[in-house]
Image (spheres, helix red, strand yellow):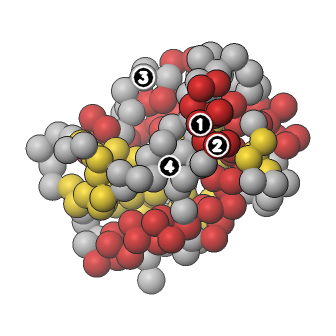
């Protein structure tokens, strides 16, 4: 059986939101709490969460059991959080790591399981979320990609790898990939 970890990225300072986005109330928990709940209901062996900005304030709001990885260089951007997370998880010998964002509240455990199932069928291929002819996260990466992920830096996220010439399987996630970046995004989410 392949070992899979889920890595939730939630280290940014949410400057466009104007407050701690990860702690915004959502469905009896917070935005980040909801992401953790969905990840824990998926069939991965472990769930980890990368924090950076406001890490202590965020930790106090998380009620679920989850392992935190702290990115001390979070200001460098998303790539540094991915690299930090991969570096921390390499020692644990996972076959696959599923990377997701803490601010995509429409993401479900069922969809995460679809990614994991497809990765089990194609163990050496990335399986990504497809939308508007692009590929992005949530995405699951086999161990052969860990070096490339750990080499990411700055604001360069995993999309660079997923949209290169490499063979990547894309599942349609058009309806699930709503990021919450601004107060308007959050208000729109609450009206759904």
> Marks 2/3: CA distance?
31 Å
Mark 4 and mark 3: span between their CA atoms? 15 Å
Point out the tag, 4 or 2, that comes first from the N-terminus.
Answer: 4
- Dividing the image into 4 quarters, which one contains the N terminus? bottom left
Residue beneath label 2, please? 191
Residue pointed to by mark 4 = 100
Q: Position of residue 46 (x, y in %)?
A: 62, 65
Image vertical order of residue 126 relative to residue 157, above or below: below
Among the two numbered marks 4 and 3 on one chain, the one whose residue lies closer to the N terminus: 4
> Which mark sits nearer the N-terminus, 1 or 3?
3
* Residue marked by disc 1: 188
Give the Cα distance between marks 4 and 2.
Answer: 24 Å
Badge 2 marks a residue whose secondary structure is helix
Query: Disc 1 on helix, strand or loop?
Result: helix
Mark 4 neighbour class, 10 Å CA radius: few under 14, some 14 to 19, many 20 or more: many
Q: Residue at x 69, y 53 (%)?
A: 34
- Residue drawn at 63 percent across, 70 percent down: 41
Instruction: Tell me if I can see residue 79 in this picture.
Output: yes
Give the residue furthest to the right: 60
Q: Nearer the viewer, residue 39 or 143?
A: 39
Which residue carries the number 3 mark?
Answer: 155
Kindly identify which numbered label has been placed on residue 47: none
Locate residue 81 relative to residue 19 in the image: left or right. left
* Mark in front: 2 vs 3: 2
Q: Secondary structure at mark 3?
A: loop
Tags 1 and 3 in contact by the CB under 8 Å rule?
no
Q: Earlier in the sequence, mark 2 or mark 3?
A: 3
Q: Element under label 4? A: strand
């Amino acid at each position: 059986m392949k070992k899979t970890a889920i890595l939730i990225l939630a280290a940014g300072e949410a400057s466009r939101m104007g407050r701690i986005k990860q702690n915004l109330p959502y469905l009896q928990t917070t935005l980040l709490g909801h992401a953790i709940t969905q990840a824990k209901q998926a069939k991965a062996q472990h769930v980890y969460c990368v924090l950076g900005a406001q890490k202590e304030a965020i930790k106090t709001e998380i009620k679920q059991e989850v392992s935190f990885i702290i990115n001390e260089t979070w200001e460098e951007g998303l790539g540094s959080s991915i690299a930090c997370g991969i570096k921390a998880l390499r020692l644990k010998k996972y076959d696959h790591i599923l990377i997701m964002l803490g601010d995509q509240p429409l993401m479900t455990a069922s969809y995460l399981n679809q990614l994991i199932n497809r990765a089990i069928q194609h163990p050496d291929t990335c399986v990504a979320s497809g939308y508007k002819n692009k590929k992005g996260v949530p995405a699951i990466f086999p161990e052969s990609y860990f070096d490339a992920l750990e080499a990411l830096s700055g604001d360069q996220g995993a999309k660079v790898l997923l949209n290169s010439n490499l063979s990547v399987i894309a599942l349609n996630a058009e309806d699930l990939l709503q990021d919450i970046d601004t107060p308007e995004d959050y208000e729109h989410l609450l009206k759904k």
